Image (cartoon, grey):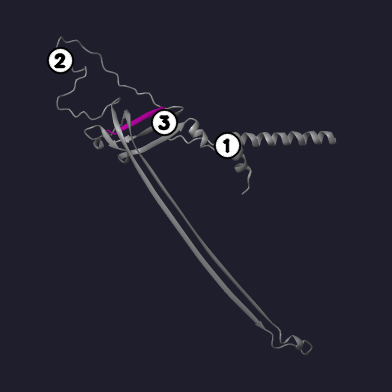
Amino acid sequence: MFKLTQQSAAKAICVAVAAFGLVACSAPPKPIVVTQPEPIIMPERGAVQANGSIFQAQRGYAPLFEDRRPRMVGDILTILVEEQVSASKSNQTAASRASNVGIDIEQLPDFLDSLADLGLDVSSASDFTGQGSASANNTFQGTITVQVLEVMMNGNLRVRGEKQIAINSGAEYIRFSGIVNPRSVTGQSTVLSSQVAEARIEYIGDGYIHTAQRMGWLQRFFNWASPL
C-alpha cells in the first residue's frame, strides 16, 4: 500500500511539474487587431452587346469631368496615419479619525474604596493617506495604401490594407482597416486616420530583435507561480 501511495505521489508531482512547464513555456496570445486579408469581390459586369459603335460605355467609361476619388470596390486610397494619444490620471485620498473615552469611578461600596482612585481612559486614532498617478503617451505616424473592400448602403467605404517591410533578418507588418466617408477623401486620394471610423491600426514585427524583447520561459514561469 505504501509503494502504491508513493508511486501516486510521484506521478502527481510529475504531472504538476509538466503543467507548470507548459504554462511557463506558453507565451500569452497576441491580440488580433486587424483580421487577415479579405478577398475583394468585384461586381460582375453584364454581357456586352456589340452594337458596332466605336464608343462602348461598358469598357472603362469615365466622363471627362468625373471626380476620380475612390468610390468603387477595388479602388485604392492612401491613409495618412497621424495618431497621438495622451492620457493622465491622478488620485489622492486622505482620511483621519480620533476618539477618546474616559470613565471615572466615584461611588463604590465601603469594601471597594481602594478602587475609587482608579479610572479608565480609552483613546484611538487612525490616519490614512493614499495617492496614485498614471500617464500614457503614444505617437504613430506613417502612410499606408488601402483598398476598398465594400461600398456600404450609405456610400461609406470599408477599406483594408497591409504593408510588409523586410529588413535583414526581421520583418515589419503594418495593417489598417476602417470605414471612410468619401467626403473626407482629398483630391490626391488621401485621408487622415483621425477621420476614419472604426479604425484598426496594427504595427508588429518578427525576427531576432523582437524575439530578444520577449520574456524568457523561465521568467514567465516564476511570474506565474509567484504569489507576490
**First in residue order: circle 3 vs circle 2:** 2
Label of residue 55 in the image: 2
Mark whose residue sits in front, 1 or 2 = 1
Within 10 Å of the Cα at label 2, are there few (<14), some (14-19), or many (20+) other Cα atoms?
A: few
Q: Is residue 119 above or below residue 212?
A: below
Residue with the most extreme right position? 1
**First in residue order: circle 3 vs circle 1:** 3
Q: Is 100 in front, or is 81?
A: 81
- Residue 199 image offset from top left, x and y in percent: 36, 37
Within 10 Å of the Cα at label 1, are there few (<14), some (14-19), or many (20+) other Cα atoms?
A: few
Q: Which residue is mark 3?
A: 173
Q: What type is the residue that disc 3 sits on?
A: Tyr
Membership of 159 in magenta stretch = yes
Which residue is drawn at the image coordinates 23% and 32% (left, top)? Answer: 188
- Residue 183 image offset from top left, x and y in percent: 24, 36
Q: Which residue is mark 1?
A: 216
Helix, strand or loop status at disc 1: loop
